[in-house]
Amino acid sequence: LLSDKGLLQRTYTQNIDGLERIAGVPENKLVEAHGTFAKSYCVDCKREFDNDKMNSAILDDDERIPHCESCDGLVKPGIVFFGEDLPKRFHKMHRADMKSCDLLIVAGTSLRVTPFSELPRLVKDVPRVLINRECVGEGGYNGFDFSEKTQDVLALGNCDDVVSELADLLGWDKELEARCFHHHGRERKPS
């Protein structure tokens, strides 16, 4: 919805499940810092692999190991495994994006995994909003400061509920409901 309204600079996510894509966030507005199951690649030549074939290989129990059709190398989902570097897109964009944003919304996170947890500290002199079930990232070098002397805002609760409340306050509730119905093919359960 923020993207549709021209208000979204970028969405950074650690999720690998592609929910942001399903929600309609355009790929150019998305940085999937831990990769995504939405794409698959050859580990040798880096050529993109047919994701339907990858999904079949993962979900079928016939123990087929997918190989690249170009070089016969092994292929893997486009997710970042332990010990692998984050995607180049993350390193290329995160500093400039954080320094140029005029509002940072952090939602549904523990803020414990670096370098992702360090992104809020790159945002200076603009409101930073934490939407989460619990207060995280407060104090210290990377921390939020929810005292009255800052622009940081804490909104505790389930992310879906807080976002719905915010949409109501902005008069976007019908648009949000329509968007949820469109992308999920079903109505949202009442809270």
Image: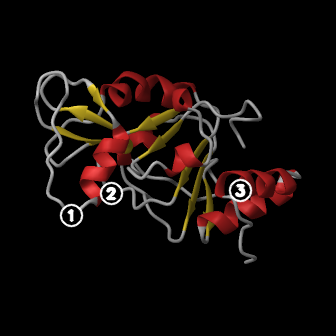
In the drawing, does residue 42 fall left or right of residue 33?
left
In the drawing, does residue 39 fall left or right of residue 120?
left
Q: Residue at x 33, y 50 (%)?
A: 55
Q: Are marks 2 and 3 in contact (CB under 8 Å)?
A: no
Q: Camera-side residue: 101 or 83?
A: 83
Q: Residue at x 44, y 35 (%)?
A: 31
Q: Which mark is residue 112?
A: 2
Residue type for callout 2? Arg
CA distance separating discs 2 and 1: 35 Å
Q: Camera-side residue: 99 or 189?
A: 189
Mark earlier in primary sequence (2, 3) = 2
Q: Residue at x 37, y 48 (%)?
A: 117
Helix or strand or loop: what does disc 2 sit on? loop
CA distance separating discs 2 and 3: 29 Å
Mark earlier in primary sequence (3, 1) = 1
- Residues packed near mark 2 inside 10 Å, few (<14), some (14 to 19) or many (20 plus): few
In the drawing, does residue 127 fall left or right of residue 188?
left
Helix or strand or loop: what does disc 3 sit on? helix
Residue at which label 3 appears: 180
Q: Are marks 2 and 1 in contact (CB under 8 Å)?
A: no
Q: Nearer the viewer, mark 2 or mark 3?
A: 3
Residue at which label 1 appears: 61
Q: Which x, y percent locates residue 109? A: 44, 59
